[in-house]
Image (spheres, helix red, strand yellow):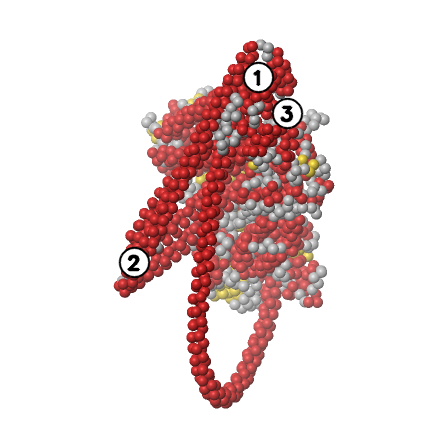
Amino acid sequence: MTTQELYSKRARVWVRDPEVVWKGGELTKDYKEGDKELAIELEDGTAVTLKIKNKDELPPLRNPDILIGENDLTSLSYLHEPAVLFNLQERFTRSNAIYTYCGIVLVAINPYEELPLYGEDVIQAYHGQDMGAMDPHIFAVAEEAFKRMSRFEQDQSIIVSGESGAGKTVSAKYAMRYFASVGGTAETQVEKKVLASNPIMEAIGNAKTTRNDNSSRFGKFIEIAFNKIHHIVGANMRTYLLEKSRVVFQASEERNYHIFYQLCAACNLPELQNLRLAHPDMFFYTQQGEAPTVDGIDDSQQFLDLRDAMSLLNFSNEQQKYIFQVIGAVLHFGNVEIVPEKHESSKIESDNENLPIVCDLLGVEEAQMKKWLCNRKIVTVREVLTKPLTHSMATFSRDALSKRIYAEVFNWIVQHINKMVIPTEKVLNFIGVLDIYGFEMFEVNSFEQFCINYANEKLQQQFTQHVFKLEQEEYVREQIEWSFIDFYDNQPCIDMIENKLGILDLLDEECMLPKGSDDNWCQKLYDKHTGKKHFSKPRTSRTSFVVHHFADKVEYQSEGFVEKNRDQVNDEHLNILRASQYEFIANLFKQPAEPVDLNKGKSAQVKPLRGVSKGHKTFKKSVGSQFRDSLRYLMSKLNMTTPHYVRCIKPNDFKKAFDYEPKRAVEQLRACGVLETIRISAAGYPSRWTYPEFFTRYRVLMKPKDVNRNDVRGTSEKTLQKLISDPDKYQFGKTKIFFRAGQVAYLEKLRADKLRAACILMQKTVRCWVQWRKYQRIRNSTIIIQKYARGLLARRLVKYMRRTSAATCIQRRWKGYHQRQKYLHIRKAIVTIQSYTRGMYGRQRYTVILREARATTIQRYARGWMARKRHRKVLKAIILLQCCVRRMRARRELKQLKIEARSVEHHRKVQKGMENKIITLTQKIEEMKEKSVKAKEQEVTIQKLNSQVIVLEKTQVEAKEATKRANEAETEIERLRRELGEVTQHRDKLATDLENIRRQSEEASKDHEAESAKLKEDLTEKENQMKEQQVQMEERMKEEVAAIRQETAKEIEEERSRHQKLLQDYNRMEQRCENLKEDMLALQSAPPGAPPRSRAIRTDSNEENESGYGTLSTSTTEDAENIEREIMGEELASMDMSVFLKLQQRVRTLEKEKKQLQDLMDKNEDNNKNIASTTANELQVTNNQLQSLKEENASLKGDLAARINDLVTLRASLQGGSGEDEPMAILTKQLAALNEENEKHRKEVLKLKTELANSGKVINNNKDVGINTDVDLLPDLSPEVEEMSKDGGLQMAYKSLKMTNQILEKEIEALKKNHEHEVQQLREEMDKLRQDNERQQEIIGQNLQLTPEARVNQVAQHEISRLTNENLDLLEQNEYLEKHVKKLKKQLKAAYKRVTQSQHESISSAAPSITSEASSMVSNSMAPIPHNHVNEAQHPSHSPLLRHKEYQILGMLEYQPHDEQRFIKSIITDFQPKHAEGHLPGLPAYVIFMCIRHADYMNDDRKVKSLLAGVINGIKKTVKKHFEDFEYVSFWLTNTIRLLHILKQYSGEENFSNQNSDRQNEHCLRNFDLSEYRQVMNDLGVHIYQMMVRIIENKIQPMIVPSMLESDSAGLTTNKPTGLRGRSASVSEDYETRHVSIDSLIKQLAAYLQVMSKHGMDPELTKQVIKQCFYLVTASTINNILLRKDMCHWSKGVQIRYNMSELEEWLRSTRMYDMGMEETLEPLVQVAQLLQVKKRTVDDVDLICETCTKLTVTQIVKILNLYTPDEYEKRTEVSFIRKVQARLHKRPDPRRETQLLIDAKHTFSVVFPYNPSSVLVTEINVPDSFSLQFLRKM
């Protein structure tokens, strides 16, 4: 390839330009060897002639279009300055890409604009990625350093440099944020402390300059320490060369350090009042720059952030106070005015206000400070002299002291930060972040610029050596021949500065001389270094010198060098400060102890440098020496690490966003070493392509016979040898082909020529084909025209002949038709007359017969109705009487049972061996019968019983009276009915009159129809208008309602997702807690041989906490009060129920709001209808009359309802007893007594009952008709009473009454205790109110100190928070009370059923003891008792009758309590999913429920709680143990949800049980409400679902990008290689992901779907899982596209669309495709469309805006900026992108539109739709493989 071939006509070159540095142009004619001129046409159309002397002066060639905008500058074919400058400009201005690689260097251009590139989502996108896989970014460099550290266990460093305003501090901050994010731990929070140091260091070390609003005025090196698991454990900071001169002087438009302005802005705070600060313009040290504020920065808010950061880093309040005092004193120091006096002396006026403030803040003596500010001490051999200072010297001394004070505070803060972030455990490696100033060259350069440029010389040397080393390693790794590359070595310049008799050494020597001066030092430099390569003397100055640095020549002014290097402060000033009354300030200036070796250990604490004042006989180190030593230490640190370089570039000096000035950019590129990197790369083989990439790209240049797809390398080598004859222009490596500079451009030229020739051939062929097709069309058209013309003539002849024949035929047909129609008309008339006549006669006969039949029917129905009416009336009366009688009997029997139950219950509890005691008492009674005293006692007892019988008689009389009142009420009802009938007749009459009136009104209206026609038309028009308005209003209301519904649904969905996120956070925190406990247990030194009991104890405690959800038991052994206390205790014990209740309350509130909105909508619709409806004026009077009749009818109905209510009340009074004031407590007690009753005592109870019934002898007197009681069933049994008295039965009855009294006394005591408890609660509430009152008074006292506006805001906030808390508490109480009421109602129903059953049971048990006479009486008055009940009473058992029936029900599994752990272990912990294959899906859930049913049947509350808690904890442990096994997690998610559905299905709640069959409803739970456990199950299901989603994400995440973007499934090839130059060390050697295709991804998803289907997962839940997977695919693919420029081109859009079609086809084949899936995939579809759509015209703008509705504005603009044109496609114009951006800015949600990346970690809120099972639990069999033989099926 010769020069003539390269510089041919239309070759593109670069031409120098004084304004833009380089301009592009084209050669207008070929270059020939020996030509002295080149004719060039520039891009703006200007023709120029470039004169050249030889080939070396030829202009640089431009790179081909394929390489424009490359991510890596070293991948350009032509590597030179204009190519680098243009590539950076294209990326920055066109693509808004601020980052670009240059080999191992990341070039970062400051955009002067906030970009959405640094969020947590971007960090996660770059985490784990190779450096060349994504677009250039600071996070990519940080990830590369982190990966190298973790993979190779090597220390790393990131060197960030650049001039002021280039963005060094921000880049270093983002790198540290990345490390904190990927290496942080929630336990230590060290990373937060590391990041918290940034605002502190920015406040005390950053300032506003003319170039940067937040310029770092010091250098720092931060070592971030990591442990063996790569978590941050500490950090260390080392600072360099603080610009102390800024404290006392600032140039125009600059500011002092931020901390001064922050203190002034916050001077109104109470804690800063003692500083006596004011506006910055009031202080000399902050007013010199005349720029006290910075746009966009709030100093007061920055101060609050500073305080927060200090608190996080454990700065105590006292330390903060002293720090602010010292800084405030520095401000006041500047206002201490020193005035000149005579004889070259100076003084401070006595009325100076600032000096006392300074001394007060520093805690020093004012007189001493005032004296030594204007004088100095001179120590001679014999005496000590005091010398006055001149005004200038005193001012300089004051400023020097201010700088020293600030520097000491700065150093102390750095030391304290280092102490707070010191590593707490062993450090394995560290990553250092160096934020240091770049090369500086100003008009006046002093000592600071010299030190900065010296540091850059050292860094540049290290950088150059490292770049050369990497190049050499790359060549060795690829095994290619290479020669030594010459590079610039700046070691002579460094030696000249730091060696013996160098610049710094001579400066230190001059500083040691008493009268050393800058002029003397400069003269020594001339003498020693004149003639050296890197040193020169200016021609016009004798006080300056020039150093030839690597970047440029810099002239330094020697003025101030000596004094700045000394950094001297009077010892008297330091002694005064050391004697400060404040210990903090005194310690700042305390003389340090002996220095400690800093090189012990890799991460030893490195303290910041500071000047140390030693004794009078010693010399402190100069600033230059200190800086040289610290720089050497820094270089040794960097040499021990693997460096990574970030070069920050400032695009312009005016801080304009995305404004690129080539002049400024090229200066910085030369200074920061980027061009040196380019030069080193260009000297070797800069272009590197892999063999497959070369084969794919240049296959068009190969001959078909040479192509061998199986040997890509061999084919490439043969082709390249034929294309490039010079073998030195390329080298074949192991995996890559290395090209010299310009060779890729030459290959691109050959390829373009080949394609151009092919295009010309194609055009020629296509044009020939088009003309031939045109001729064929003309010929065919002519033939067709001739054919149609001949056909037209023939058709005309045929048409004439047909018309003639048709006319003759029509005439004939018409005449026949006319005669036939006439005949048919006459015939039809005759037939019609006959039919009507016959019909009339038939209808008359039918009417007569019909009337007779209807009359007969009416008579029959009337007679039947009257007979039925009489029968119903009689039957109703009989039923009413029977009801009253039976009610009275039941009430009496109930009262009697109450008395018996109480006495028997206490008798049974107090005395258990009742039978033996009865025998003993019987013997004692027989002995006492002989005594007369016993007889008297029995008589008294009988008298008491007689009195009770009298009371019963009175009750019977009252019952009779009540019956009479009931009869009277029924009579009254009959009367009211008759009146109602009369009113009905009257109403019918009025209706008839109303009909007459209407008829008259209609007749009258007919007369006025003509007059009202016009009015009706107007009315019709108005009605139409109102209808239209109504329709519009209805549509508007519908739209509003739809919008409200959508918002409500969205809020509910957000609440659900928020709840699930809270649950996820709770599970994560629980996991972390367990991890910490495990670590603590591992750290504890357990004794040898001791069992690990602590772990078991911890697990049990966790289980108890997790199972803290109580259940409401309907057990009959507890009363309502105890149940309420138990429920409250269990709810308080639950750990996370408060959060759940608040979320549940929030959902309920949203539902109420939704209901209110629905009511509002209905009300608006009704209003619209009322507006649309109109009333007729003619019927106004009639309507009023009808309304009055309706009101009268309503009043009659009200009276009737009141009478009926009176009747109901009367009946209720008849049913209720005198002692039923508290029916709930009494029924509960009766229920407890009846259930605890034993069969052994039933006979004794019946005997006592018989004695009480016969003792009064009043049963025979109660013979009234219609009243039947239990006493009526028994005959006169006086002989038996006497016999029982002999046996001692009456004595037993007496004792039972005594026991009853004792029970009442205990109840009274219990009431007293409850009263005392309530009094105690009231006292506690009073104490709380008193405390609240005191707190309110404190708040009021604080508010009085605030301003009125702040006071109002604080009171409003306090009131809002208080009302919110009270509202939440009331809502929780209301919800709890509602639940409690429901549960009590269920208990009441169950108690009533059991009371009824017990009554029947007692009656059936009493039957055998009644004699045959009683049996006959029973048969006359009641229905006979069933035979089976009598048998059961004769053979009593120990279980109630109902229990015998329940034990016959199947579908329950019984186990012993000690087998519970065994059961949980078998069915959950040790269960393997493969054992469930071939059985019913969800079989373990059914087995668990069958055990729960048995515990519910046995009414065992503890068993239910223990079982459910064990099941929940067992499932948690199992999924936690197998957290990476998808099969286990899917299996237990399916069973958990199935168990949740079963608990709902068999809960007995109506909304669930209405879908069950009758047999399934028989299996519902009866005693327990497990609704709270259902919520726990639901939360557990959410947790397992999220775990399963994470498993899927971890598996398919690495497959998404290779399958969706990198695989060539559609048969398309990429335009250019992905590029791995210089990244081989960071690229993983595992290339399996590169061969992943879309089929692999679909295969993996199908495998997951198959597992879920095998386990029987609900289809809706399966769809949610697949939807989450496709969301991950969409988000990861789009995020990768947004961060990779090589993915944004047309062919990639086609490939994405092809892959999308494959995914959609798979979804349709599995029947998973629905609107939800389509919506999830829609953003990715729109991205593919955006890549494929044209990008030229305004119509294309409209199309993009209408199509990309799911993409944000930022995403669309980003893709357009990154879009790379394919072959022969024009680049997208910037104006087109601006048009799209302007159109998209009109979108309604600007906050959403700023989002760049999609949150790939987002998880949709999962919903478990209720899915009842049709399987009967009675049909379930437990397989033997489950190992549950210890269970017994009931």
Taking depth in this image into account, of 1353 and 709 the one nearest to the observer is 1353
Coordinates of residue 1075 in the picture (x, y in percent): 62, 34
Coordinates of residue 1085 in the picture (x, y in percent): 67, 27
Q: Residue at x 37, y 40 (%)?
A: 1199
Disc with the residue nearer the chain's start (3 vs 1) = 3
Relative side of 32 to 561, left or right: right
- Asked if the residues shown at circle 3 and circle 2 are in contact, with their CB atoms under 8 angstroms apart, the answer is no
Res 341 → quadrant: top left
Q: Residue at x 46, y 32 (%)?
A: 1214
Where disc 3 sits, the SS reads: helix
The residue identified by callout 3 is: 1240
The residue identified by callout 1 is: 1291
Disc with the residue nearer the chain's start (3 vs 2) = 2
Taking depth in this image into account, of 1799 and 1588 the one nearest to the observer is 1588
Res 967 → quadrant: top left
Res 1329 → quadrant: top left
The residue identified by callout 2 is: 1001
Kind of residue indicated by mark 1 = Gln
- Asked if the residues shown at circle 1 and circle 2 are in contact, with their CB atoms under 8 angstroms apart, the answer is no
The answer to whether residue 1805 is seen in the rendering is yes
Q: Residue at x 62, y 47 (%)?
A: 1814
- Disc nearest the viewer among 3 and 1: 1
Kind of residue indicated by mark 3 = Lys
Query: So how many labels did they put on this image?
Result: 3
Kind of residue indicated by mark 2 = Ser
> Neighbour class for label 3 at 10 Å: few (<14), some, many (≥20)?
few
Where disc 1 sits, the SS reads: helix
Q: Residue at x 47, y 53 (%)?
A: 860
Disc with the residue nearer the chain's start (1 vs 2) = 2
Name the quadrant of the N terminus.
Answer: bottom right
* Label at residue 66: none
Coordinates of residue 535 in the picture (x, y in percent): 53, 45
